[in-house]
Amino acid sequence: MSSIIKLKGKGVTKIIKSKVMLSPLAGVTDKIFRKLVRKWAPDSLLFTEMINATSLKKGYGIQKIDQLGLEHGPIGVQIFDNRPYAVSEAAKLAEDSGAFLIDINMGCPVKKISKKGGGSALIKDRLLAIELVKRVSNAVKVPVTVKTRLGWDNKQENIEEFLLNLQDSGAAMITIHGRTRKEGFSGTADWGMIGRIKELLEIPVIANGDIKNPKDALNCLKKTNADGLMVGRGILGSPWKLGEIDYAIKELIGFKEPNIEEKLLLIIEHLDELIKEKGTHGLLIARKHISWTCKNFPQATKLRNNLVRAIDADEVKQLINKTIETLNTDQKLLI
């Protein structure tokens, strides 16, 4: 099974060497988290957090794309807004910073975004969505892609025609979350409908929704015949998950999931990077990652509760190192 995905921009062709991608996740997929994911997924397309076009243009969102060109592997930038000129200007800034591609968000279900005409609201304002793709495609040389959903509040909205129009307007790839905006993240992603859309489009189609492990990934590829997969919430607390899925898709053997000690040491590594980058605020950011990572092993609940209440980085490290010592001692006693 070929793992290469080719995307055409304005005079350039970009090649992705992995079928599994990291979804843009607000408050999660910053450059520090991407660095962790990249350890296990050297070829995957990773995304920044989604960025508001206005914040990027005014400069206070620039830290999200700062020095993208220095990162290893392809990094996409997802922009949300409903003003073609603003998205085009932001896209150019992202391209100049080293973005591998520009993705236009047409799927975010969050009300504060959709009520302003961005994200999933563009599914309803289709002429504007088409204009966005045209304008951004003309503004940058890198490929322009779209991430969207199966509809606004039902699946009878002729989403197929909408996606065909986006393709004709210059979209180089479309990622489809297998739910409507109304469904949010409830219920089950409709992989079958993604498969029907894949048959209609000529550009690459990426399936998104309910992909949490290699088994899900392989089942989704089989049912959709999609060109690739995008993993979102399944990565939380498991930055190695993208690499594990990539191994399965490429039919490679020997992937090693980090053991308990390695996962706990990963928390320390992540925390150190956050403190270095963001100072004491880094501990607040680390707490949510700690909650996601610290699970499924003896003492996990107790440790997690203690870690999220820790007042500084030193206390976090002491708690983790003490737990590792206890786990190692218990393991020796079992032997």
Image (cartoon, rainbow, N blue to C red):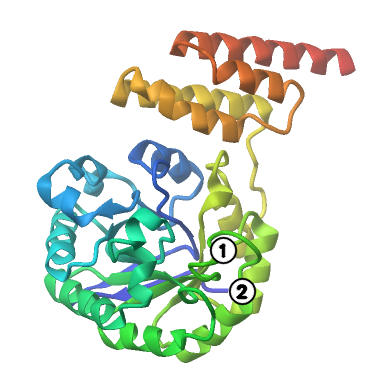
Q: Residue at x 55, y 78 (%)?
A: 194
Label 1 crowding class (10 Å Cα cut-off): few <14, some 14-19, many 20+?
Answer: many
Judge whether 280 appears above or below 80 on screen.
above
Residue 190: image tag: 2
Q: Residue furthest front?
A: 115
Judge whether 170 appears above or below 92 on screen.
below
Marks 2/1: CA–CA distance: 8 Å
Residue 237 in sight here: yes
Q: Nearer the viewer, residue 239 or 253?
A: 239
Label 2 crowding class (10 Å Cα cut-off): few <14, some 14-19, many 20+?
Answer: many
Whether residue 257 sits left or right of residue 77 in the image: it is right
Q: Residue at x 55, y 43 (%)?
A: 240
- Mark 2 touches mark 1? (CB < 8 Å): yes
Residue 173: image tag: none
Whether residue 114 sits left or right of residue 260 in the image: it is left
Q: Position of residue 11 (x, y in %)?
A: 18, 77
Q: Position of residue 57 (x, y in %)?
A: 12, 52
Residue 270 in sight here: no
Residue labelled with disc 1: 209
Q: Position of residue 314 (x, y in %)?
A: 47, 9
Q: Residue at x 44, y 11 (%)?
A: 312
Judge whether 309 appears above or below 26 on screen.
above
Element class at badge 1 = loop
Q: Quadrant of the C terminus?
A: top right
Q: Nearer the viewer, residue 19 or 28?
A: 28
Q: Position of residue 167 (x, y in %)?
A: 33, 84
Q: Nearer the viewer, residue 79 or 319?
A: 79
Q: In the rendered structure, which amino acid carries the disc numbered 1?
A: Gly
Residue 17 in which image quadrant: bottom left
